[in-house]
Every structure is written in C-alpha cells, then in structure tokens.
C-alpha cells in the first residue's frame, strides 16, 4: 500500500447549467462537483501495489451548454479545464495530457487534452509504487 498526495486544480466554465465533474480512482469515487467555477482537490489516496486507473468524468452536458452561430461554429461552450495536476508535489499535467485517453459519448476517442467539454471519461493509467512508474514514464 502506498499513500499518494493527489492534487488537482480545475476551472469550470458553463452556460445555462454547470456540468457534473466526477473523479474516480479505479471504481472508487473520490470527488463530485457541480457548480464551482474554480476548485482545488487535495486528498491523500491509499493505493495498493499494481495498476490503477484515474478517471475524470463529465456528465450532464446538453445542447443548452453550447452556443453556436448560423454556420454551426461554437461561440460559447461549457468546459472543464485541468489547470494543475500533481502526485506527491510532482507536476504531472504534461504527462496527463500526453498519456490520457478521453472516451467521449458523442465524439469518439480524443487524446492529448486537458480540456473536457463532452460527456465522457478521461482515463489515465498509473502504477504503484508511484516513483517507479514516474521514472518509467518521465525518462
């Protein structure tokens, strides 16, 4: 077992109504938000040795959350942007962008993003012990 300090900052911009934002480690829900414009999560998470999946899920988005012009060009949109992402005070935002996979409900699979604007889940694989996994992925 390893204790990890999980730190996340995100911005939540919406029109009409806020999106639902959920964070899971594997199948364990650790956070739910619906309405904060900017928020910080700072939690200690205990994980067993081996493979794990961190999931950021967006739900509750509908047509009222996006404004388009007559040419269907998006003028304004509801999104969640991951501003800061750390494990044990190590900045992993670039690794999150590079290695995560965003499975959207309406637009298939997207990669290399920290902007969540569609219903779906951004999946990020990790492994414990965390420092061994970081060395494998950063160098």
Image (tube, grey):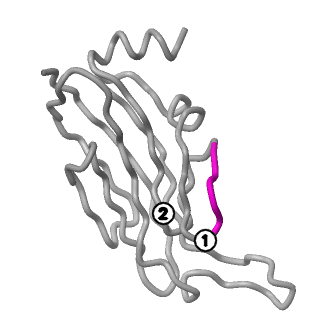
10 Å crowding of disc 1: few (<14), some (14-19), many (20+): few
For residue 94, side relative to residue 67 (left or right): left
Residue indicated by mark 1: 106
Q: Position of residue 25 (x, y in %)?
A: 27, 43
Question: What residue occupies the far right of the structure in this picture?
Answer: 71
> Neighbour class for label 2 at 10 Å: few (<14), some, many (≥20)?
many
Give coordinates of residue 3: x percent, y percent.
15, 25
Quadrant holding the N terminus? top left
Residue 55 lies within the magenta run:
no
Q: Secondary structure at mark 2?
A: strand
Which disc number belongs to residue 120? 2
Taking the image as shown, residue 77 lies to the left or right of residue 24, namely right
Identify the residue shown where x is 56% and y is 65%. 117
Kindly identify the residue that appears in the image at 42 percent across and 34 percent down.
125
Residue 22, compared with residue 119, is above or below; it is above
The reply to whether discs 1 and 2 touch (Cβ–Cβ < 8 Å) is: yes
Please report whichever mark, 1 or 2, sits nearer to the chain's N-terminal start: 1
* Residue range of the region highlighted in magenta in the rendering: 107-111
Q: Which residue corresponds to the image point at 63% horizontal and 41% vertical from the top-left?
A: 112
């Amino acid at each position: 077992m390893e204790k990890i300090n999980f730190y996340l900052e995100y911005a939540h911009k919406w029109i009409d109504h806020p999106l639902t934002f959920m964070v899971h480690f594997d199948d364990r829900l650790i956070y739910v938000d619906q309405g904060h414009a900017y928020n910080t999560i700072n939690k200690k998470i205990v994980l067993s040795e081996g493979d794990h999946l961190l999931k950021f899920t967006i739900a509750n988005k509908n047509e009222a959350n996006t404004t388009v012009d007559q040419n269907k060009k998006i003028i304004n949109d509801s999104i969640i942007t991951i501003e800061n992402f750390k494990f044990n005070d190590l900045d992993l935002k670039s690794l999150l962008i590079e290695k995560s996979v965003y499975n959207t409900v309406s637009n298939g699979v997207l990669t290399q993003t920290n902007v969540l604007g569609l219903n779906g889940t951004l999946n990020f694989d990790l492994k414990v012990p965390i420092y061994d996994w970081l060395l494998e992925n950063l160098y």
